[in-house]
Image (cartoon, helix red, strand yellow):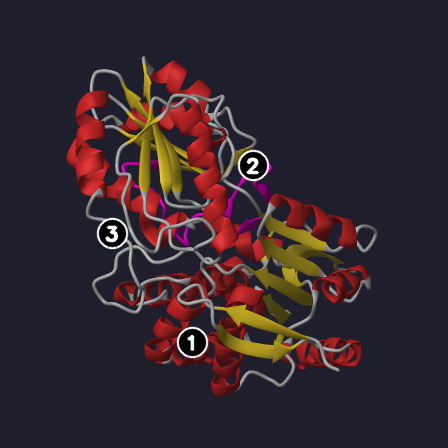
Amino acid sequence: MTDTVKIISPIDGSVYAERPLASATEIDSAVVRAKAARRAWGEVTIPERQKILSHFVDALLLMNDEIVPELAWQMGRPIRFGGEKRGVEERSRYMIALAAEALAPSIKPEKDGFTRYITREPLGTVMVIAPWNYPFLTAVNSIVPGLMAGNAVMLKHASQTLLAGERFAMAAESAGLPAGLFQNLVPGHADTEKLIASGAIDHINFTGSVEGGRRIEKAAAGTFATLGLELGGKDPAYVRADANLDNAVENLVDGSFFNSGQSCCGVERIYVHETVYDTFVTRFIENAKGWTLGNPLDSNTIVGPMARGNFADHVRQQTEEALRGGATRHLNTRHDLDKPGSPYLAPEVLTNVNHQMSVMREESFGPVVGIMKVADDAEAVTLMNDSPYGLTASIWTEDLDTAAKLGASIETGTVFANRCDYLDPALVWTGVKDTGKGGALSEIGYANLTQPKSYHLKRV
């Protein structure tokens, strides 16, 4: 009997889709096809790859009307937000356009009698292990530049969002990518680790939990495959005394609760200068009241269910622990759907919090945010760094020079000023500490998906 994986919809607990797990034979065959396809792809020029990958993006975007309700059924995002079309297009088009420059040979200064340069060669086969929270946005970060750089790509999508992998495969076929160059696989965890350990994979890009990252690293040990790991996060924000509070409140509420708080770079803790603390909290709570919970298939719903009930229960437990420790909850929204075991969880704002509470130090990945008063910049930076994670941090101030100076002291992969929860494809997406290693997007993303090769040619 063939093992299968089921998508249990957070909307109503039904089985939305079911797919068979790939067999060992199918996985081995995929490896062979990838190796053959990438040899032929290596003969295709960068301009031709750009045309083909542009068609790939076009094909993906044309499916958006079907993708939007699929996302709601698979992981709970409300249909009102229109899926991930805008970000997918922005990142993909940018990386496609950047390829010629990023992959061009680096010509070294003239030296009498010698020609010297460095090229960027594809690594070989890239495996993308994508998460469910942003199933298209996270995947394109590696799929598009991976293919543009000349690699074959294998995608293993999260079991919660298997249909996203199928959409990528449809787009690849529609664009005319060579057979086997891009493949969507549905292996189990053990077979995934076995494939990584086999040495057939040259680069693994994984987005997920810290524990998942450790398992990937362990499986890859000894293969010398390169890794890109984006793991946990506990992203902080600091609202300085000179911040534009209207801008800060609107964006930080969105950064805290969009996608039911299930964002890698979502805001999970906020530090506010004591002189503006009361005003900020009052305005933040008033704005947050508009983020109402409901069925994601209803166009009026702003906050849908979390992907799974146990994810919501984790946030409930963090909130209850904080309340026992003296925290104050401000929304306390009553909703028939919000009950233990249910993926439906209404947003919550907590004050009177401290760093002895897990809600301020451990990843929540849900619609709860703690707000703390601080006396000055130094206290804010100390608290922002009091975390095992470091993906993004945002500073809200009219003084951008000070923001940059403070940013240099914050242990994080990206420093924002007066914005949050956004990936600019021109900038590398990376993290520090337990958030992971490597980097995606920008020219650095291409460097991490290629191998440098030197040419030292002497004229005789």
Local packing at callout 2 (Cα closer than 10 Å; few below 14, some 14-19, many 20+) is many
Residue 231, percent from left and from top: 57, 46
Local packing at callout 1 (Cα closer than 10 Å; few below 14, some 14-19, many 20+) is some
Q: Farthest residue toward the top?
A: 375
Q: Which mark is residue 432?
A: 2
Task: State the extent of the magenta-drawn residues as a range.
Answer: 416-440
Mark pair 2, 3: CA separation: 34 Å
Residue 101, percent from left and from top: 48, 60
Q: Report the residue at 31% width, 35% height from top.
A: 349
Answer whether residue 260 is magenta in the image.
no
Q: Which mark is residue 197?
A: none
- Mark 2 lies on a secondary structure that is strand
- Mark 3 lies on a secondary structure that is loop
Q: Earlier in the sequence, mark 1 or mark 3?
A: 1
Q: Quadrant of the C terminus?
A: bottom right
Q: Which SS type dominates the magenta stretch?
A: loop
Q: Is residue 223 above or below residue 431?
A: below
**Can residue 430 be seen in the rendering of this structure?**
yes
Q: Which residue is mark 1?
A: 54
Is 445 situated left or right of 241 in this image? right
Q: Earlier in the sequence, mark 1 or mark 2?
A: 1
Which callout, 1 or 3, points to the residue nearer the camera? 3
